[in-house]
Amino acid sequence: MAEQDKFEAYWRQNLTYIIILLSIWFVVSYLCGIIFADSLDTIRLFGFPLGFWFANQGSEVIFVVLIAVYVRLMNALDTKYDVHER
């Protein structure tokens, strides 16, 4: 694989990861926390209505989890394309 092709494939995969993870965060923080909050309030999580939980805790918790997932994905991608730190 040519160096330029390798570089383009690496960034294409990286952008795919970013789009997917940011889409998940959008769904959790905006849709679940704001748009569907009233509907989700009929479900309880840890004693709190689910819509309230998403608006106050869920988006932050999911964001931290997504950061950890992104780190793992990028470490694997760096290794795959041999651009990892040595």
Image (cartoon, rainbow, N blue to C red):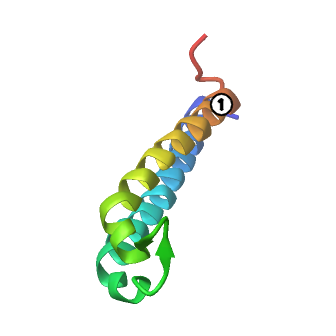
**Location of residue 80 in the rendering, given as x and y in whole percent from the top left corner:** 70, 32
Residue 6 vs 35, above or below: the answer is above
* Residue at position x 53%, y 55% in the image: 16
Name the kind of residue labelled 1 in the image: Tyr
**Location of residue 40 in the rendering, given as x and y in whole percent from the top left corner:** 43, 83
**Location of residue 73 in the rendering, given as x and y in whole percent from the top left corner:** 60, 41
State the quadrant of the N terminus. Answer: top right
State the quadrant of the C terminus. Answer: top right
- Pick the front one: 66 or 60: 60
Residue 51 vs 61, above or below: the answer is below
Residue 31 vs 18, above or below: the answer is below
Q: Relative to 76, is 64 on the left or the right?
A: left
Task: Pick out the residue farthest to the top.
Answer: 86
- Pick the front one: 19 or 38: 38
**Location of residue 64 in the rendering, given as x and y in whole percent from the top left corner:** 44, 45
Read off the residue under disc 1.
81
Residue 8 visible to the viewer: no
Task: Pick out the residue farthest to the front.
Answer: 47
Per the image, label 1 sits on a secondary structure element best described as loop
Residue 38 vs 51, above or below: the answer is below
Which of the 4 image quadrants contains residue 34?
Answer: bottom left
Residue 84 visible to the viewer: yes
The local crowd at label 1, few if under 14, some if 14 to 19, many if 20 or more residues have their Cα within 10 Å, is few
Which of the 4 image quadrants contains residue 75?
Answer: top right
